[in-house]
Amino acid sequence: MANSALDNAIAFSRFAFMILGCTMGLISGQIRYSIPEEMELGAFVGNIAEDLRLNVPQLSARKLRLTSDNGGQYMKVNLDSGFLYIHERIDREFLCGPATMCTIPFEIILENPLTVHRVEVEILDVNDNRPTFRDSAVALQIAETIAPGIRFPLVSAEDPDIGINTVAAYIISSNEYFNLKAQRTENGVISAELQLEKPLDREMQSAFQLILTATDGGIPQRSGTTQILITVVDVNDNPPVFDHEIYKGSLIESVPKGTMVMKVKANDLDEGLNAEITYSFSKLTSPKVLELFSLNPHTGEIRVAGELDYEETSSYSLNVQAVDHGSPAIAGHSKVFIKVIDVNDNAPEIKVTSVTSKIPENAPPGTLISLLNVIDRDSGENGQFHCDVPKNIPFRIRMSSKNHFELITSDLLDREVVAEYKIPFVARDLGLPSLSTNKSIHVVISDVNDNAPQFGASSFNIYIMENNSPGSSIFAVTAKDRDMDQNSHISYSFLENLVQDFPVSTYLSINTMNGTIYALRSFDYEELKAFQLHIQARDAGVPPLSSSATVNVIILDQNDNAPVIVSPSAHSAPTAVEIVPQSAAQGYLVTKIMATDADSGQNARLFYQMVKATDPSLFNIGENSGEIRTARKILESDTTTQTLFILVKDNGRPSRSSSVTMQIAVLQNITEKVTGKSLRNSEYFPDLNLYLIIIFGCTSVLFLVIILLLIGMKYKQNTNISQEYYSPSCRGDSNCTFNRRPAMEETLRYPGTGRMIHVQEAQHYSVCLSPESAKSDFLFLKPCSAPMSQAQC
Ligand SMILES: *[C@@H]1O[C@H](CO)[C@@H](O)[C@H](O)[C@H]1NC(C)=O
Ligand SMILES: *[C@@H]1O[C@H](CO)[C@@H](O)[C@H](O)[C@H]1NC(C)=O
C-alpha cells in the first residue's frame, strides 16, 4: 500500500513536470513547479540549475540560496545536482486549508551577479484525508407521533481535502423509516437531512441505529461514518392492558383478613409515566365489594379486607382498572370473579318452637315434649346435620319434616326416680370438622299419686306402763310417701276395731297430721294386758292411696297391787283361829296361808314371813308355800293359845305386803270343835256367794262320803304320811294350774270364809286359779276328773 502510494506520487510529479514545461515559457523570470503534497523527503521537485540556465558548478560559486517569506524549509536545492528536493513534509491542508490554490513561494538568490529568481511551487491536493464526523455518534430524539415527511438536519462530515477530494456524498444505512436528503448549498458544501418516510411507533421500534457515511470524490475514494442514534420518544398512545380479560379466583369463606386473593397485572406498551400504572376498582364496583376487598394500587394485589360469608354471597364480581400516568391518562379495564367456597363455619341453629315444661309422670311413651326447628346455614355436607339426645334418658327425637323435629318420651317416666330432666339436644353437622350446637331442654316431671304411704314396718309394738296418765303421747308412727305435695300429705287414723267391746278410739287417739298416738285412759294391766289395732296412713291424692300397719299395744305391769290374803280372810274375825291337836307331831301342817297378788311376774311373787309369835320356836312358815307347821312336838307346858303375826310380801319394787294375825288353839280333842267352828262363821258369807258355796259344799260332802268308804277299806295300810308336791304347769300372767297331791289332811278354805274343809283322803284334785279370780277375789276350787296329770280347767 505504501509502495503504491509512493508510485502514485512519482506519477504525479511527472505529470507536474509536464505542466512545468508548459508554464515555463509563459511566466518569464519566474519558475513554477507543481507537486502533489505529501511527497517523500528528498523527492525531486525540479531541476533548478537547468531551469535557471546555469551549470551546476556555478550554483556553488554563485552561492545559491533559497529564501522564503515564512522561512519555511520545505524544500532545498542540491548544489551538486542542481535539483530542488523535498526537505520537509508538505501537507497541503496544513499549509493552505480549504483554499483551492496552494503555493509555496520562495526566492532563489544568486550572487556574482546578484540575481533573484522567484520560484513558486504549487502544492496539488492529494486525497489524503477521509471525510470525518466530529462525533462518532449523534443522538436524535423523535416523538413517535411525528408525521412522515418531516426532515431532521444531520451533522456534516468534514474533509480538509479540496475539490473532488472533499465530501462528495452522504449515504445512510438502509432502513424502512428514514431516507436521506442531501443538497449542495451555495458554498458548495453538501448538507444532509434525514427525512421520516413512514409513521413511527415506539412500541414497535423504539430506537434506530443508523450509520451515516460520508464519501469524498477522490481516487481512491475515502469515507467516514458516524452513528445516528434515533430514539423514538414515547407518546401515551397505548392504554394499559390486563393480562386477562377476566380473572377467576376462589377462596374459602373463612380466610382471614389480608389474605391475597390474586394479583392482576396490566401492561402498558408505552414507557415512562405513560407506562406507569395505578390499579383501582372502577366505579362499577359495588360498595359491598369495596368493603370486602382491597386492591393494591401499585402491585395489583387483591386482598380480603372484610369477612366473607358464603351464606350471604357466594361469588363476587370486581371491576378493576389500570390507569397510566400519561397525560392524558388512559385506563384499561378487566373483571375479576371471585368464587367463595363454603366452609363449615356455621353450627346448626336450634330453635325451640314450643316446649311443654311439665309432663305428668304417667305420660305414655311417645308423648310430645317439644318442637324444634334446626337449620344449618352452610351448604352441602356442611349444611347437613344429625340431631341427638343421649341414649340413657327416656327421650328421643323424631323428625317430623325437613328441619323440624319433635322431642318425645321413649319410655315410662317416674318422678320418684328422676323428677326433672335437662335434656341436652345436640345438632351436629357433617362438615369437617363438624360443628355442633347444644340446647338444653328442661322438662319437669309432675307428680301423679302413684305411691301409697309406707310405714317403716308392718307392725309396731307399743309398751305402756299401766297407770299411765291419760292424754299423754305414747308413740308416734310415721309413714313416708314418695310422691310430692298433696300426693304425699299423709293423714293417720285408726281402722275401726273393738277392744273389749269398745272402739279402739276410746282407748287411744292419733294425731291425724303427724301420727302421734295418745293414750286416752289410764291402763290397768290387771284389766287389759295387750291389744291390737291398725293404723292407716292415707295420702291426699286424688284418688287417695293408703296403707296400714298393725300396732300391738302391750301394757306393762306395775306393782300396784298388794298381796291379798285369801285365807285366812283379812276381814274375818280380828284374828283367825286354827286348832292344833296337842298330839300333833313335829311338822304337822297347821294351816296354809293363801294369798294372791293381782300383779304379775315378780310383782306377784309372794313371800311369807312369820313376824311375831307367842312362841317362835313352836311354829314355822314356808317362805314360799305359806304353810304353817309345827316346828316341834307340842308340850304340855306350851300355852294353849298361840298368836302368830304373818306378813305376806310380793317381790315388786317397791314391795307391797299384807299381814294377818292368827291364833292357834292347842286342843285335846279336835272333832268336837269342827262343826261349831264352821257354823260360827256362816254369818259372814256374803249372800252372793252363798249359793255357790252350797253347791260346793254338797259336792264336797258327796265326795267325802266316797272317800270315807274308801278309807274304811284301806285304813289299815294308811301310813299317815303327809307329803305333797306341787308344780306349776304354767307360769305367767293369766292362768295357772296347779297339779297337786295334797296331804291326807289338808285344810282348805273358801275365799272370804273361815270355813275349813278337811281332806282326809289321798286323792288327785286340782286347784284352778281362773283369770276371773283376780277380778272377783274368788278362789275357785274345782275338782277335775281323775286321774290327772294335766288339769283341764
Ligand atoms: C354440650 O355443651 C357442653 C358445654 O356447652 C359441653 O360440655 C358438652 O360436651 C356438649 N354436649 C355435647 C354432646 O356436645
Ligand atoms: C304432732 O303434733 C302435735 C300437735 O301439734 C305436737 O304436740 C307433737 O309434738 C307432734 N309430734 C311430732 C312427732 O311431731
Image: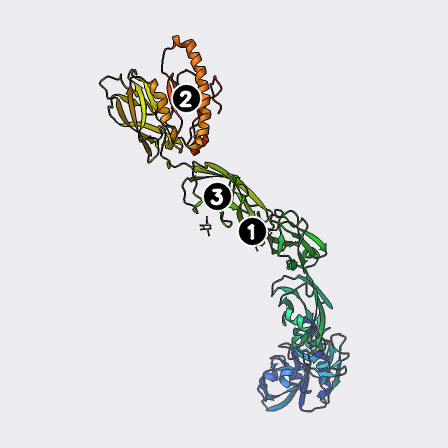
Quadrant assignment, res 599: top left
Q: Can you identify the residue that label 2 sits on?
A: 727
Seen from the viewer's position, the closer of residues 302 and 536 is 536
Q: Can you identify the residue that label 3 sits on?
A: 507
Q: Is residue 140 above or below residue 101?
A: above
Whole-number angstrom distance, CA of label 2 to CA of label 3: 38 Å
Tell me if the residue at label 1 has its CB under 8 Å from ligand 2.
Answer: no
Mark 1: amino acid: Met
Tell me if the residue at label 3 has its CB under 8 Å from ligand 2.
Answer: no
Q: Where does residue 30 sit, x and y in percent of width and height?
A: 67, 90
Whole-number angstrom distance, CA of label 2 to CA of label 1: 61 Å
Which residue corresponds to the image point at 43% horizontal and 32% vertical from the top-left? 687
Q: Is residue 29 above or below residue 252?
A: below
Q: Which label is found at residue 426?
A: none
Q: Can you identify the residue that label 1 sits on?
A: 484
Mark 3: amino acid: Tyr
Seen from the viewer's position, the closer of residues 749 and 305 is 749
Left or right of residue 557, residue 410 in this image: right
